[in-house]
Amino acid sequence: MQDLSSLWQAVLDKLELTVSNISFVMWFKPLKVVDFVDNKKLIIAANSTSAKNQILRNYFDKLSTAVNDIFGDNIEIEVLDQNEEIDYIKTHGDSAKEKEVEVSKNPFNAKYTFDNFVVGKSNQFVYAAARAVAEHPGEKFNPLFIYGGVGLGKTHLLHAIGNYLKEFSPMLNVMYVTCEQFTNDYIESLGPASKSKAVNEFRSKYRNLDVLMVDDIQFISKKTSTQEEFFHTFNELYQNNKQIIITSDRPPKDIETLADRLRSRFTCGLIQDIQSPDLETRIAILRKKCQLEKYAIDDDVINFVAERINTNIRELEGMLSKIYFLANLSNKHSATMEEALEAFNGQLEEDRNEGLSPDDIIDTVCKYFDITRQDIVGKKKSKDVVEPRMIAIYLISEILEIPLVSIGKIFGGRDHTTIMHSRDKISDELKTSHKYQSFISEIKKMLKGG
């Protein structure tokens, strides 16, 4: 049994993955549950008549899918505006607060399927491996370890496997969890007074499975007791030919403080990376997004976005949603280059307003790699200093667009060709190296105060 507020939060979590951030904040986040009648009809309230109409006209299918995933199939939905909510409460009372509901929860996002996954040179092998595992769980590629940078499609593939198994092998007991959720479940099992019972329930939950999928396993790093428990869980499933699928932002050998025996287990199956999409794949991804979301966007806009953003899929799709939103504000049927240029100009202005200086970037890189400023601008040539130095040079060049000669002066009077080599070296590494992608991403978060 679960209370309505928890279930509704789960619905919102699903919706946040299926709509643009702007749409979610404007239309879905303010929604609240008013009542759940006879476990069959969910009554929710919007904060205005226009919000209600927007949801009913443009997003009702997404809302219905999310509700049915969480509450169960064939749930009727009624959306009220503010006045209708007041009238309903006067007639029926505010009855939703105390209700608990028995639900059949589907953890897999219906948006993430194999059909909706755009295959290109950067991901064709990992797609084939995921598909093979879904079709023959426990028989091929066990465990399957998928690694790659943020926003490249790892979670999409996990959900695609789950949705495939739900459709074609519904008798299988399949579980998808994040590493954080596994850790929290384990910690909670250690808390109650009846410790042995709680631990046994935890182990029963995770070891009586046909398929276990764990997202972002890198977060198990430094958690010694959780690693110990996961090791035994892994062994129990593996020895019984149960399928294990794991994702990470880096390969097993690069996960710090990971127990050697876990590292060994992770490498005994298939390890497959997923790389940043090339231009053709990025264009195909954007076209698929337009098809799924029913966006009307000019082809030259799609090409423009694909050329400007080469980092990850989330940024690509986020920019496309922003462009379409700007077109909607202007009551235009189709988004054009006018909206694209406005969207990117806003992004550039945001970057300019950060007020960063070369010193800010150097200090942040020094803090990240635990080295001194004297080391990074000095003459040391050891790897632990050269690598951070090149990253600092790359970031200053990319973010601040300072001339190479000026950057050379900052770094102890180095020649501009040396600075160019460092910048280009990191730029090339970022195309394929998940380690460097992680470095740059985390340092940029620190620069933004994240």
Image (cartoon, rainbow, N blue to C red):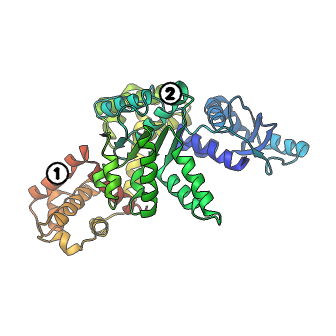
Determine which residue is flagged by label 2: 292
Tag 2: Cα neighbours inside 10 Å, few (<14), some, or many (≥20)? few
Instruction: Mark yes or no: residue 448 visible.
Output: yes
Residue 295, image x and y in percent? 50, 28
Determine which residue is flagged by label 1: 425
The quarter of the picture where residue 36 lies is top right
Q: Is residue 61 above or below residue 203?
A: above
Q: Specify the amino acid type for callout 2.
A: Leu
Sequence-wise first label, 2 or 1: 2
Q: Which mark is residue 143?
A: none
SS of the residue under disc 2: helix
Q: Specify the amino acid type for callout 1.
A: Lys
Instruction: State left or right for residue 381 relative to residue 175.
Output: left
| 72 vs 85, nearest the viewer | 72
Q: Is residue 309 above or below residue 120?
A: below
Instruction: State left or right for residue 60 relative to residue 136.
Output: right
- Total labels: the figure holds 2
The quarter of the picture where residue 63 lies is top right
Residue 284, image x and y in percent? 37, 27
Q: Are marks 2 and 1 in contact (CB under 8 Å)?
A: no
Tag 1: Cα neighbours inside 10 Å, few (<14), some, or many (≥20)? some
Q: Residue at x 53, y 47 (%)?
A: 206
| 100 vs 229, nearest the viewer | 229
Q: CA distance from mark 2 to mark 1?
A: 38 Å
Q: Residue at x 68, y 45 (%)?
A: 8
SS of the residue under disc 1: helix
Considering every residue shown, the one lying at the far right of the view is: 91
